[in-house]
Image: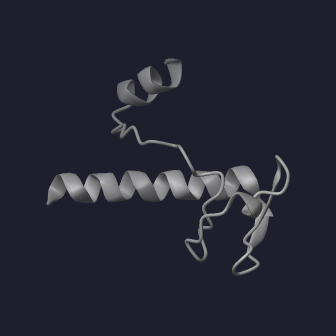
Amino acid sequence: MFVTYKVISAGVVVRPVDPRGTFRSCPGSGHIDTRNRSTRDDFRGVSCGLAGPADYFAAIDIGRRAVCHVAGDAA
């Protein structure tokens, strides 16, 4: 993938993570429910009401998974 090549050439560590389920996981409460993402672009946590751009919240979840992956490597 071109992006991976570019970041590695810039000295950035790449940690692949499994993105499955990130579209339905609430970064505020951790609640996982398909109803959290009512439309392609909108996210609203059914358990806590956290709302915003769906892709932004999915990116937060992917970032957290990457951090957990790195922490697991260090253990």
Q: Quadrant of residue 50?
A: bottom right
User: Where residue 11 sits: x, y (%)?
Assistant: 33, 34
Residue extending furthest toward the front: 34
What is the image's colouring?
one colour
Residue extending furthest toward the bottom: 48
State the residue at coordinates (83%, 50%): 41
User: Where residue 28 sits: x, y (%)?
Assistant: 61, 75
State the residue at coordinates (23%, 57%): 72
Q: Quadrant of the C terminus?
A: bottom left
- In-image side of 14 versus 23 (left or right): left
User: Where residue 49 sits: x, y (%)?
Assistant: 76, 78
Q: Quadrant of residue 46?
A: bottom right
User: Where residue 65 sits: x, y (%)?
Assistant: 42, 54
Note whether 19 is above or below 29 in the view shown.
above
Q: How many numbered tags mark residues here?
A: 0
State the residue at coordinates (70%, 49%): 55
- In-image side of 53 versus 64 (left or right): right
Note whether 74 is above or below 9 in the view shown.
below
